[in-house]
Structure formats: structure tokens, C-alpha cells
Amino acid sequence: MTDTSTNDGGLADAVAIKNYLGPYEAWNFGLGKAYAFPAYRGDDVRFLSALAEHPEPQKPHSLLDGVASDGHGMWLPTVWGKEDDVALRFWPIVVENRSDDGIAPDSLALNLTEAMLSDPIGEARFRMAFPVEEEAMHRHARRMTADPVWKPDTGVGTGDGPNRTLNVLGVIDDGIPFAHRNFRAADGKRTRLEFCWLQSAHKKEGQDHPSVLFGREFTRETIEQLIAKHPEDEDALYAEAGASDQQFGSGAAINRLATHGSNVMDIAAGSNPDKGHVPPEETRLIAVQLPNTYGWDTSSFGKDMYMLSAVHYILERAERIAEGYGVKDIRVTINISYGFSAGRHDGEGELEAAMDEIVAKRRQLGRPTAIVIPSGNTFQDRLHAEITSDHLGSGTFEFSWKTQPNDLSSNYLEIWFPDQLDPGDFDIEVKGPFGKISAGMALKPDPSYQHGDPRNFKSIQLDPPNQGDAIGQISLDNHRKSGRWRVLIALAPSEPHDPGLPAAPAGEWKIVLSRGDVAPRDHEPIYLWVQRDIDLEPFLTGSRQSYLHDDDYRLVSEKGAEEESDQPDSNVKRFGSLNGMATGATTLVVAGSRPVIGSRFEKGELMASSFSSAGKTASGPAVGSVDCTARADRSNIVPGIVGAGTRSGSYSSVQGTSVAAPLVARRLSEAFSRCSDQEIKTAEKDNYLPIVQSIALSDQSVEGRTRLGEFLVI
Amino acid sequence: MAYFGGIGGIGGIGGIGGIGGIGGIRGIGGIGNLNATGLGSFLGGGGALDPLTIQGLQTSAQAISHAAGDGATHPSREMNFSSSENLDKWADWVRASLYLSDFMSELSWEAKEGPTNEVTLSYRSHSGGALQPFFSVVRPDGELFDKQLNLVRSYMDQRPERTAEITSQLGFPTPYFAMIIGLIPGRNNKTLELITLTQVLAAHVAMIVKHHLAIRRPDRIGATILPMIPTPGHGSFPSAHATEAFAVVRMLEGLIDASGSHYPDGDKRKNLLRKQAERIAVSRTVAGVHYPVDSWAGALLGKMVGEMVLNKCGAQTEMRGLKYEARAESDFMISQYQPTKWGAHGVSELQLCTVDKSDQFEWLWKSAVDEFDL
């Protein structure tokens, strides 16, 4: 794929912008568009979400000053710090697609150009994300969203003890049962949820100045009204709230018996009246329900804007809670039980950098802010590998990537060169199963790209000698111009939804990395990560996971148990599989563990849940690390943790590090209610782990500590 | 004992049996949930035994008959003439036949062709009197169902979690109601008989309406519906499952009222029954065999059938006729299924209808209510 646009008059600016789009956008809106998820490939996409990265911090008001006054073209959702006009480099935005033919790189470029006319845009980067459904979007919203109509709950604070500090716990998830009785106060009528934003609910008509740009917002008062109105029918409650609205034609997760979000939010903040729990009223709750479309793509692509805007929203509303209840510098914990497997793993991925920026900014203001994230569930999935300079001793190294039949979604493999290693003297060759396909690229940027990250593209074609159909893309980019070079290989599905489309054959793909004579002989390892590609809940995506293969990788130990250590001779590794959005500086990372028969879990005697991902044990560049662990399985034979289902009184069992993280978030919010400013300040550099009540783990081995950290939170 | 044919209490009035011949309501018998019909098998073969036993009976009869001696005949008593007291002496399937005949003999229907094609059901008492229309439904146009398809698709993702319910509700979902009010065979035989009877009547009434309206199933007009169970061989609109479930719920509401203080929390049970009926109806949409408006039509029709049953049982109940004109955007939810809300979904009221009591129904009702003595 080359940059075909030249100086064609009005499109010149557009070309400049187009140059800033990354390889995932190039595939999903360009060469691979026919294979993209339905919301991308449709021709009726009107509103696109994106994460904009500016070279210098921008104030929200000045961002909006640049917006064309005729209509809009670009909108900001509810953002934190708008009163103080806090300057940030990363901003979540929504742009309008003005093309009648769906989205393509050219029209995308034009849309972004038209949307942002101010000068700094010339150097901005964009990370595109899922569209915003037209029914959810307040197209005529004013430049800033309105303040919510909200007042504090006068009943809070009685009987909770004088030494409790009011704090905020935010949960970002899918299918959140915000009216569930477990989130109510002790009287069963008042809710502890102060704010709830359903990002993809259809908008409430007749609001000319809405408090959220898309979807719907509920305050404690409106949730209580819904509860009072539907005391005996939560189905009707969620329907009236718009939570059951279809999204891009699929049913809402809240209509299911159980969702990821119902279990996670219950562990983080639930209080079950059947068990006599006393609700912690000092912890005020904010929930953000992500779109259902979230489940469509388990690779990292498409989520960033929804995530970042959720963080902005929680922090913005937290400041309102602080003001309403008269709490200075309110302490905020946010649980995000999500992740992906690829990414650069050095804290500088777009979303990680954006979250770090806003968290650091708020901490600078003296307001404690914590983000809790799971370590990931891909430890045994063979999604990570490393290529050392020893592997490249002879000048070439060949490895295997296996894709599966009946896979309806694209597959992605990211190859990350170590910091400051210029791959200019390397070549890559991609060979299809049975040697029938071959494509190669010298890992040098194409100088015709004059703007944005230095990069290059090449298509992978069927029947190469005859220039057959394109079924994949090789790209190189100097990610965020930071000196971290990435090769991304994108492959079409092995079974496209439309049988008329060319398919990438399933099977063993061989990838050969060759080093020339000029490149250094001795360098840090090159890391590989395959993107996660599964049908989570299931959302009928037809996704099937591809994986890396090495004959020396051992699945089962000599004793017949599931192997959980790496083999030195295998380049495919378990350690290093950490969640790709959990490597930022300000996130607290939680692994999952399980009790072992005959030992005392509550004394820190336990095992990692076999799926629980981890950082690196060996030397070499770190890929992030686990901070602590919490239970993710009831035992080695009873999987998962029991939490609430979507309806009051129902239960669900969910397995994964996703259910370990919210327990730590809960304990951290308790610590925030209990600890002094000084204690919290001191713990800040360790992302507050020191103030969370925990138990030292008995396993002091390197592997044990890498997988679980040093502490158990129960 | 090895019987051929249904063992008492099992099999029999399964599903939506055809009215084959003398009303052999066996239909889809044998599929699920027939352990709680309370009516045994319909035309159960009179207890025919296996050939070996029949042969054994003959030889043993010859061997022992002399022990009865040659004495004079004994005078015998007669049963009462035309009395519901005799019902308990008849086989369960015979009672089922009598209930059905009684009910259907007072039902009439008219399919009126015109600018709007409409089917109207009416009641006329055995004792004469006026024809009283109690349910009227307008045939929706095809475009409405095209729009409803989109709603059907949005339920598809719940198939995995509802599979157990959907497949165990292919026949009558009686255990799903029995759970709520705690019914078991043996102790609640007559209540179960009443439930099954109501379902059978509802099924027959639904078939009449379905036949005239002749609406094609979702999988016929949308290739991607791909139902998870075989699409039944009758029209889509109204849903017989919804008709049966809401008829049963309406009848059980009356039974709970008549059971006095048996349940301390009768209102909650009624809520649960209604919610369960909603779920049963919606599960058919999840499965891919019904549009939401099918559930609407069925739920309304079921209410009418339930109220007719109550009145025939002597549990006097106001019965206000209903007319239904489906709306394309209607999803089916119990929260909308109430007189203050359903106008927005195309429901309007007809005249009041007066239904006479029936000896047979009254007998069964009294026997069922007696099971809730405390």
C-alpha cells in the first residue's frame, strides 16, 4: 500500500492527516475493510470516535475554538478539567463522516481535516475507534456538554463512623446492572451509584443541551426514580433506561442472565443484602457501560476513545461529588477489567500514555487517583515470543504463526524491535501454508510519507506471481516517532463472512526475519505478540485465536500437569504475556490466583491461576509487571468467582484476572476511606499498593513473584 | 408393569396436539414436561397389557374361577344420571375430551375479509343468548413482519443461555409454573389437570386464529434467523406458547385468590407467574420461531381463554373483550402488558362478555381449590 495521493488541490491537507493514520487503520479502513467488523465496513457510518494525540498539551477550549462553526464536524465528550482548562496531549474526540460511501482512508483524512482546523492539528496523530451509533449521538450538542442535574444524597454519612473519608470508585465495563439491589444503600431504595453513563444507549430525544455527548446519563436521583417506578420488573427498568437498546443490530448485554460487568461491578462494589452485608456508603460509585460493540474486536483496535472518555467522565463527575459532599481532593479508584495482548509493553501505547497523562495530572493537583487493571488471561495461549540476537546468529530466524480455520475475523501479529534499534538493515518475509504465498519487505520507511510516523506498507497477495487478491498487509512504523519500531502483519480471516471474498489460508505461516551485515550483532530481544482474537461472551464474532508455534514449547510437564514454566529452547514464551494496556506507570496490575488443596490461602499459600499473564523473569527490557494478586478461581477444580448476575438476586460465575482486579479496587477504595493524606501520598509512587491490606506471599521464587507479585489481597 | 401406550400420568396431552379423530390430543407427546399433566394419556389404550400377561391372566382365570362358587347374583347400584359426580370415575383422557367438547361447543369464530382482514372469536352459551365477541385481531401486513425481523435478530445472542429452557418448553412448560406455586403430582393432581386443560383449550383456540391469519414464520422471510429448534407446522401469529402461558397464568391468578390464606404472599406469586409467562413467550423469539407481536397477540388471547375458563369454573371474573392491531415497533414486555400501557401497542377494548358456568369445570375447580386447604 502506498500513498497514492499527490498535491491535488483541496486534498493536500487531507493527505497530511492521512499520513498520521496507523497500520490498524490502514487495514481496517483500507485493504482489509471488507473483512472488518460490520460497523466499520458499512456505508452508513456517520460518527467516528478517535483518540487524538497532540505534540504539545492542548486546552479543551482552544481545541474547540478551531472547530468549524458551520455545524460541527468534531465534538468533545464530557471531559475532566474543562473548568480549569487543563492542558493535555491526548483527547477523546468524535468526528463526523461526511462521505456517503462509508469510511476509507481518504474520506477519513478529509473528515479529520475538516473537523480540526486549528494549527496544532497539523502534527496530531489519530487512533481511530468504534463508530458512535447515530441513534446514540447528540449531533446538535453544544461545544461543551451540559452539567448534570445532580445533588448529593443527604442520607449519606449517618452511621458510617466519623473516621471514614468519602471517596469515589468508578467501574468501566459492559452490561452494568446499575439498578441492581447490591449497589443500593442499606434501606434498599437509595442507590450508592451517583452517576452512570451508558455509552451506547440511544439518546433521550428532546435534549438540546445533553450532559453526555452520546448515549445516556443517569444520576442517583434518576436511578432511584427508575427503581421506584419498576420495583418488580428490572427488565422494564432497563428497557425504559435505554440500556436494552439494540446496538448496530445486536441485542444488549444487559438482557442476558449474566455479564462480565455484572460480576466485576459486584466484586468491586456490591453489597448483598441476603448475606447481611453493610453497604459502604462512604464509597460513592460511578459506572460507565461500554458499547456492546466492545465485544466485537478483542484486539486492541477500536476501544481507545471509549476507554479514555470513560476515564475522563469518571474523574469529571468525581470532582462534582467532591464539591457536592464538601470533600477536598477526593480520592478516586477506577477499575478497568479489560485488556489486549499485543502492544508495545513499555507504557507508551496510545491508551496507556493517555491514561498515565491524565492520572499524573490529577495526582499533581494533590488528588489521589488510582487505576486497577488485570494482568491478562493469555499466559497459556502462546501469543508471545522473543527473538534474541543469538537466534539471529546465522543472520536469519524463521518462526511459525498458526492461524485457524473457520476464523471470521482478521489476525494480527506485532513484532516490536527494542528501543532505538533501527531495523533498517532487516528484511521480513511472510510465507503462507505449503509455501504457496510469499511476501517480503525491507524494513525501511518509505520516504514518500513526509508526515507522521515513518513507515511503510506492503500487501500480501494470493498467487504472488500473478498479483492475486490481497489477503494481508505487512507494515513497518516507528510508533509515535519514539524509536520503537513495529512490524505488523495483518491477515484476512480464513473464512470471511462473505464467501465471495478472498480468504487467507489457515495453517502454519512462516515468518523469516533476516539481518544484514550492518545491523548490530548484539541487541536486546525482539518481542512478538499476537493480538487476542476470541469470541468473548459470546458476541457471535466468529473469532478464533491464532498462536505462535515452537516445537520446543512444552504444553504438559513430565508429571502430566499443565506446564507453567518456559522452556529455554522455545522462542514462544509464557512470561511476557502481560496485558498490553497494563504497562503504564500509573496502573496497579492484578494477577489471578487460586487456593491449593491442603494449604492456607489466607496465609498467602496459593498458586497462580494457570491463565494469569505475567511480565518477564529474565533480563532484557521489561514488559510491565504484576503488582499483586487476588483470587480468580475458587479452587483448581472449581473455576471462577461468584458475583452478581444482571438481575437482583441472580448470580454468575466469571473466571479470569478480570474478577481479581475489582477485589483489589474494592480494598483500595476501603483504604482510601481509612488512610490519612500523608499515608496516601507516601504510597502514591507504588500506585497505593502499600496502603491496601494484603498478605505477603509464601512463594518467593522468581517465577512466583513475576506471576503474582509479592502480595495477596483478600 | 409393562404397559403399552402411555403410563398414567406420562405422555398424553403433549404440546399442541392435533385434533385428530376423536380429539387424540397426543400431538407432540413424549417431549418434555409431560410428567405433570395430571391427565394421563389421552385415549390411553384402556390399559392394554403385554401379550404374555394377557395369556397369563387367562390361564390363571381358569385356574381360580371355581373359588367364586355358583351362588345367586347380587343386586347392583347404578351411577347417577348426568352428574359431574361421575367425572372422577372416568379415565383422565375422558374428562379431557369432555372439557374440550364443552368449551368448543360454546365457541364460534368468523374470519372476515375486507380492507382489513380480521378474525373474531365469540362466545354463545349452551343455553342460548347473543353471540358475544371477545377477541378480535387484525391481520398485519407483510411489511410489519419485515420490520419485526430486526427485533427477532436482536434476541439471537441469548440462545446459548436459554437452551435448557427452550428445549424443555417444546411441550407445555408446566414445571416452570409448578415451581412458583409448589405443585407436585399426587398432591396436586387436579390443579395440574386444570393447568393442562387450560393449555389444551388455549392451544386449540390459537390454532383457529393462526389458521385464518396465516402468517409465515420468521425463518421464512429472513434467511439469517436460523432457528435453533424446528419451526412448528403452523402459522406464526399469534404465538400458541404465549396463548397457553398467559391463559394458565390468568387461571392461576384466580386459583391463588380462591386458595385463601394458603400462600402468605400471593401477590408475589402472581408477579412471578406473569414474569415467567413473559419469559416463556420471549424464549420463542430467542429460539427464532416467533416475532414479538406474536407474543402480544398470544398473551392477549391467552388472557381471554383464562378468563373464560375461570367463568366456566364458577370463579366469576369480569371478562372485557380485546382487539389487537399489531404495531411494527412493538417489542413484547410484561411491563407493557397492562390496560394502562397496551393502548400504545395497538390494544383496544371490546364489550363485556358473560360466560356461563359449566358443571364439569366447576367440579374440577372445586377439586383443585381443595388441594390448597391449610
Image (cartoon, coloured by chain):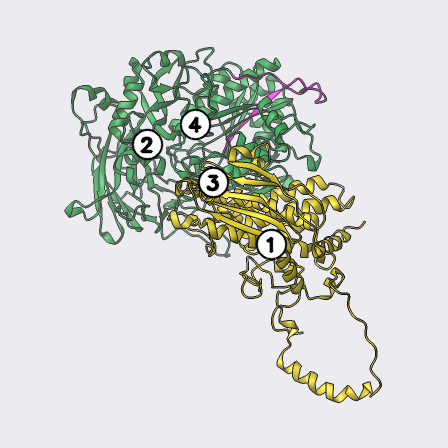
Chain colours: A green, B yellow
Quadrant of the snapshot with the N terminus of chain B: bottom right
Label 4 or label 2, whichever comes before in sequence order: 2
Q: From the viewer's perspective, is residue A349 above or below residue A699? A: above
* Residue A136 circle label: 4
The answer for how far apart the CA atoms under marks 4 and 2 are is 14 Å
Mark carried by residue A602: none
Residue to which mark 3 is pinned: A613
Mark 2 residue type: Asp
Magenta stretch, residue numbers: A148-174
B78 magenta-colored: no
Distance between the alpha carbons at the discs numbered 1 and 4: 45 Å
How many dots with numbers? 4
Q: Quadrant of residue A535?
A: top left
Query: Could you tell me which chain the residue with mark 4 belongs to?
Result: A
**Which residue is label 2 attached to?**
A44
Badge nearest the viewer, 1 or 3: 1
Residue A378 appears in the rendering: no
Q: Name the kind of residue labelled 1 in the image.
A: Leu
What's under tag 4, amino acid-wise?
Answer: Ala
Q: Earlier in the sequence, mark 2 or mark 3?
A: 2
Task: Say if the magenta span includes residue A149.
Answer: yes
Q: Quadrant of residue B61?
A: bottom right
Mark 4: which secondary structure?
A: helix
Determine which residue is flagged by label 1: B201
> Is residue A62 something that shows in the picture?
yes
Mark 2, chain letter? A
Mark 1 and mark 3 residues within 8 Å of each other at the beta carbon: no
Which numbered mark, 1 or 2, is in the foreground of this view? 1
Q: Residues within 10 Å of mark 4 (few under 14, many from 20)?
A: many
